[in-house]
Image: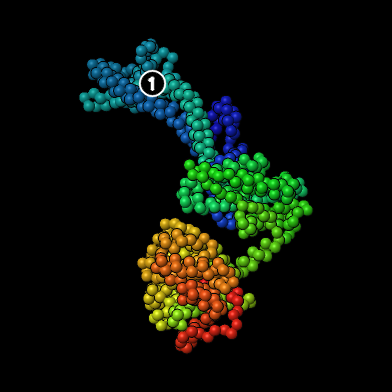
Amino acid sequence: MAFRPLVPQALLAWLRLRGGWPWHGGWPAAAPASPVGSAPSASGPGGFVPAGFVPAGRARASRQKPGILVARIVTGMAGGAALLVALAIPLTYLQAARSRLLGAVEVSARLHAAEVAELARANPAFWEFEGLRVSVPHVDSASPEQRRVFGHGGRLVIEAVPEGGLPWPVLSHRAPILVRGQPLGEAEAARSLRGEVLAALWLSLASLGFGGLLFAVLRMLPLRLLNQALERASYLATHDLLTGLPNRGLFADRLEHALAQSRREAGALAVLCLDLDRFKEVNDTLGHAAGDLLLKAVTARLQAVLRDSDTLARLGGDEFAIIQARARQPEAAEVLARRLIAALEAPVDLAGHQAMVGLSIGIAVAGPGLADPGGADPSGADPGQMMRDADLALYQAKENGRGGHCFFAPEMNRKLQERRALEGDLRAALAQGDFRLAYQPEVNLASGRIIGAEALLRWERPGFGNMPPGLFIPLAEETGLIGPIGAWVLREACRQAASWPAHLTIAVNVSPVQFRQAGFCEAVAAALAESGLPPRRLELEITEGVLLHDTRETLETFQRLRGLGVRIAMDDFGTGYSSLGYLQKFAFDKVKIDRSFVQRLGHDSSAGPIVQAVVGISRALGACAIGEGVETPLQAELLRQQGCDDMQGYMFGRPMAAAAFEALLAEGLPPPRPAAAVPEPGREAG
């Protein structure tokens, strides 16, 4: 039986008005988010268009058929439950009434059989009646009942029939008439079931109304709850939980639609990639809770600058992006960039702490008459290409000094390709063991002996020749390759120095990034253990770049290195942010006087007193001083006069292979000086 005809038409009309049947409309679409983003959320870093990403519009279309199927299933289950309730109530009542009436008829038939047996025992002529019919008047307090007596062979002897008879349906029961244990006939009692059937019909009408109401509740409530859950899940999948802005996926969908619209209208479009400056410092110093507050405050300031038609999204971490459509480009994008940067110039209050952050912006534009973002027709620009171009422009803005904006230019692609090629060659060199070390001697002028060497990293890049460390070390720091490269330098330098005389030390340059990486102390310990080099013979040279992060972690790393027994030297002292406080707090074993002071000796009257002061301070703190970049006998003599006997530079030897350095050791005493001093082409890095 179909359940739908049982539902009152008024209820059906009411259901249609409240939302329609699911097989007519499908799932209601989730409410679209506001262009600027009006409620909380978050996403992590990654490629701009994730693999397998489906734009929101197509996702809604793909959910339509499953939504209709679910609606039909829910409707069918609700209808089945309502029909079951609507039928169960009257049927249960009718079955109970029938059982009750049948029990009464059985009792009446037995009593009637006993009465007839007594009558027949007293008057055997009773059985001579045949078909005698007696009319019984109706008594209001009793249910009408028909009684009949049958003899042998089913012959009707007598019957008592109510006035008007018994209406259909009728329930009857026969009981045997026993006289002295012998069956002489049967007594039958019958009653009408019509009253109970009519009551059941009236009850059915009421239960159908209740079933219709139950159907409406069971259908609408689960679908509404499911719809709300789907809308919430859709929101969480497309928005950042912290700031409420669209996330990377929704931003890609909106950018795709904005590009399509700009093509139809022959308009221009700009994409701005934003990155907060000094955000990591806030996280490190004030904690992640303060970082979250900062992101919310920054979001509010950025939204205050934008139009309602602009889209602001958080791509992850401290990265944001903006779509600026229907504006004159590139002028509008430049004006917006300046306003965004100005919006973050004022300090941000973070629960009593004042945080100063800046903003760097990369901009890519597309449209008729504009420079093409990727070298192709602007009408063919795609979301991924525009985001890559804006990212490149952002990278250039950061290189230009942060706190500014930069438009994408085609030559940035060339720089990116060169950078990627250099990174690929670096990884290949690390995997294939193409790096090598050169060793520059350190000497003591008073004794004329070599006291150690500094290990310097060298790389013959295929097709490019010898690559200066200054060209590839910064990239290794950015990509994280400095960790494995630095670990190789440590192992190789310790292995080589282990075969030298016991009084020689080996100095290894340590990058600030490498120093802060997890596992650095373990790498030093492993290099010493593998080579068998005594820890006191290893010197780690660090610059003020390490000390700029004067944190608990930095101090702990120093203490762990001290615990290993290695020596620590401050390189390039006197430049940058070097201070006496650093020397006292971190207790260096050696201070290397920067070459800029050494090369001015004999030419600048202030250079001598500065060198003398550095040597005196080093001795007062229990450290020795060494002058680097010594190229002439005059510089060496002036250093000696200022009390600095340990030196390093081209005057005593250029960086050389391990075999050449060992040959130099075998010759003894000072290495031969070059006939003419050759200026060192910039600082050697390791």
Residue annotated with mark 1: 191
Spot the residue most to the right: 369
Q: Which sits in the foreground, 433 or 535? A: 535
User: Does 542 sit above or below residue 84?
Assistant: below
Q: Position of residue 91 (x, y in %)?
A: 43, 29
- When the figure is inspected, residue 431 is found, relative to residue 514, above or below; the finding is below
Residue at (59, 75) in percent of width and height:
680
Kindly identify the residue that appears in the image at 55 percent across and 78 percent down. Answer: 634
Residue 5 to residue 575: above or below: above
Q: Residue at x 64, y 52 (%)?
A: 404
Indicate the amino acid at tag 1: Arg
How are the colours assigned in the image?
A: rainbow
Q: Which of the 4 image quadrants contains residue 565?
A: bottom left
Which of 336 and 450 lies nearest the eye of the viewer? 450
Residue 255 point in image, percent of width and height: 66, 49
Q: Is residue 245 visible?
A: no
Image position of 407 with respect to 308: above or below? below
Q: Number of labelled discs?
A: 1
Give the percent coordinates (x, y) of residue 189.
35, 21
Residue at the extreme left of the image, as rendered = 180
Q: Quadrant of residue 604?
A: bottom right
